Amino acid sequence: MEGLFIQYKESVKLTDPEIKQRNETKELIQSDIRKLYANSSLELFGSSANGFGHSKSDLDLCLIMEDDEQTDKVQIIEDLVESLKADVKYRRVVGIKTARVPIVKLTISRCNIDADISLLNSLALHNTNMLAAYNDIDERLQTLGFILKYFAKVCDMCDASSGSISSYAFIIMMIHYLQQLPIPVLPVLQQLGDRSVGPVVNGWNCYYFKDIRNLYEVWKPVERNRMSVAELWIGFLKYYAMDFDWLTDVVTIKQLDKLTKFKKWWTSKHVAIEDPFNLEHNLGQAVSGRMRTYMLMRFQRAYKHHTKPKHWKHLDELINEF
Ligand code: CTP
Ligand code: MG
């Protein structure tokens, strides 16, 4: 199982030339947008920048303006759509003005990659960097993250806009699991060091410990976790299928202490996954009771199936039987 997981990750993860191409594409779109807004800049975030990027992942871009507070978001979306629509470099340009974070969606004709340009979404830049920092700590996270994203896609439960949860929320679930193990794989970066240094973004403290090279000078787990990726994967499935209390508890990566829905005023939600910085945002808010039952059933089935003493020859043999 272990070999298949690593093989899969190596075959799909973004290569250095692909990352370079994504950065060049970002520069190209940025220069077009600067014709409209000279003082704006574009930043790459999401899986193109956090280590969980797939060659088919969309391009998540964030538009930063000089004076974020004063800008009229609806007007910017309208201007961007009008201007990018007229440019043959882009196809299928649409603006979504009413979303929590307004975005322009488009396809880049040259490489056929879909991109989402979100407006003034600075928190996402910080959470992207924190996920990348977690990836730097232990490479097992990246392998598990890729498998989990694949599992979630195959099970059709990875789309926050249609009642399930985003790739990002699944990665938060994995980090939470790796933090709460008796011998943890990951620390709680938001609790190491001095939180008072911030930065504070949109009113939220986005601090996390960044000096990963010297991590073990401040983080002193009882011992190093030596579990294999396969053992951790099965442990993850078991944790969410059987141990985690979905009725009362919240998935969080900002603290080790148990966090309850009651404490967050989220008792009416079926699934509660706390965003690490915007503490009012529940990444599981769109999940219905039926969807939660379905997700749990998929975790339970995969757990039962994967603990069978069987020699898996192909990842698809394993995944398709999820
Ligand atoms: N994000 C967020 N809050 C959410 C959903 C997403 O802040 N509720 C931000 C995160 O920075 C996340 C990025 O948007 O990394 C992209 O989200 P998503 O597309 O779900 O995750 P990716 O890691 O980009 O996965 P994929 O490869 O499937 O695109
Ligand atoms: Mg993405």
Image: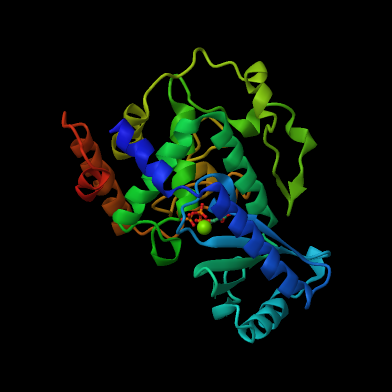
- What residue appears at the point 41 percent right and 42 percent down from the top-left corner? 9
Q: Position of residue 97 (x, y in %)?
A: 61, 76
Q: Say if residue 192 shows up in the picture.
A: yes
- Give the quarter of the figure containing the N terminus: top left
What residue is drawn where x is 47% and y is 35%?
141
| x and y percentages locating residue 59 in the rendered image | 56, 61
Residue 40 in the image, given as x and y percentages of width and height: 78, 67
Task: Judge whether residue 249 can be spotted in this image.
Answer: no
Residue farthest top in this picture? 222
Question: To which quarter of the image does residue 242 belong?
Answer: top left
Q: Dividing the picture into quarters, in which one does residue 190 lie? A: top right
Q: Nearer the viewer, residue 308 or 4?
A: 4
Q: Residue at x 75, y 75 (%)?
A: 72
Q: How is colour applied across the structure in the image?
A: rainbow
Left or right of 28: which side holds 249? left
Query: Quick check: 143 left or right of 322?
Result: right
Q: How many marks?
A: 0
In the depicted structure, whether residue 111 falls above or below residue 181? below
**Spot occupied by residue 107 in the image (x, y as percentages of width and height):** 53, 73
Q: Nearer the viewer, residue 204 or 186?
A: 186
78 w.r.t. 181: above or below? below
In the picture, measured across the screen, residue 54 lies left or right of residue 155, that is right
Q: Is residue 69 left or right of residue 90?
A: right
Q: Residue furthest front?
A: 17
| Image vertical order of residue 116 relative to residue 316, above or below | below
